[in-house]
Amino acid sequence: MWFAFIAAVLLILSFCLDRPKTKKAVILAYKRFIFILPSFLIMLILISVILFLFPQEKIIAYLNYGSNIVNIILAALIGSITAVPGFIAFPLAGILKEQGISYTIIASFTTTLMMVGTITFPVETTYLGKKVALIRNVIGFVIAIVVALLIGLYFGEIVL
Amino acid sequence: MKKPIEQKGEKKKSLFKYVNLTIVLVYSAFIAYSYLFKVSSGIRMGTTLISFLSSMGKILPCAFIIIGLFEVWVPRERVEKHLGHQGGWKGYIWAIILAGTMAGGLLVALPVSSALYHKGARLSVVFTFLGASAVVRIPMTLFEASFLGVEFTALRWLISIPLIIISSHFLEKYLTKKQFDIK
């Protein structure tokens, strides 16, 4: 809601200062929006299909309790293909913690959830092209694994 | 020699369009069918679609309005000075602060990064911004800390931010050789 408020205030301010400029801004906004709309629709379709295939209960069932490298990678893969908005992801992470799932696995899962977007891929490709979008997501995946390993070391879940 | 290559590219593009169009049509037909004949799987997909559409439908138009105003009002020299090659390491800090205070995640971050890039922000700063927008968003972080503890969140920040900056730096180095361009 605050986001809409800021946009409205800025728009009104801009309109009072310079009408032709504001008109230009609105036309630009419209053009940019239309540019991304098709990929956005495809993404929404992907989300609804993937959320249907991987509901919360299934995600919890697939995440394993141990913290070895196979489990970490598995959790990262699950985090990469599922798409859960932040306001669902963290309560979910809280539930996972209560169920005794390690910080290592949770870190791997939540970090890929945020950094690797299979579902946002069509939108990302529209801006960055397939190759760079792919590189960026692979980097995110690797960072997530490193984060998970170091968090595991810190909390003593991974012993060298 | 040049023409056939261009034509091939265009053919590929239009083929891609048809594939997307087919996906949308088949999907809509399935959802419509599900609602008519009460197929539970289709109705569940339709419900998620509508809930996401309404939540993103509120954020995206506002985001694009702000981006449009940014493009019209903010002079190129200012972006170049702080986020371009002249900005130095401070550019990364600006990118992280900007990412931290934004709403909407990657879907908003992508058009914003495109606008920044076209105003003269350097690639490594743009990629840092994109990476950070996934990790450090402040409203989300507060939420995370309340569920997983401050220690967990602080660690995740401390480890991922340097890695994001380093990887963005190398990505820029790699891409400047390849004549890369953000749409």
Image (cartoon, coloured by chain):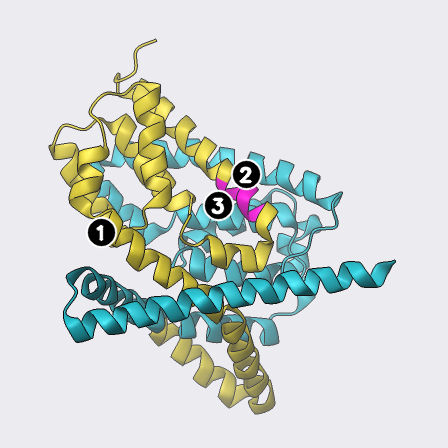
Chain colours: A yellow, B cyan
**Amino acid at pointer 3:** Gly
Please give the residue where the numbered disc 2 appears in the rendered image: B165
Contact, mark 2 vs mark 1 (Cβ under 8 Å): no
Question: Position of B9 compared to B45: left or right?
Answer: right
Please give the residue where the numbered disc 3 appears in the rendered image: B131
Query: What chain does badge 1 belong to?
Result: A
* Residue sitting at x 27%, y 69%: B31
Front label number (2 vs 1): 1
**Amino acid at pointer 1:** Ile
Asked if residue A136 is among those painted magenta in the image, a careful observer would answer yes
Front label number (3 vs 1): 1
Q: Quadrant of residue A9?
A: bottom left
* Residue sitting at x 37%, y 67%: B26
Farthest-out residue, left: A98
Instruction: Let me know if residue B127 appears in the view.
Output: yes
The dot on residue A88 is: 1
Q: Callout 2: 10 Å neighbours few (<14), some, many (20+)?
A: many
Q: Looking at the image, is B157 positioned above or below residue A154?
A: below
Picture coordinates of residue B84 (x, y %)? Answer: 67, 53
Provide the residue span drawn in magenta: A132-137
Q: Looking at the image, is A109 positioned above or below residue B60?
A: above
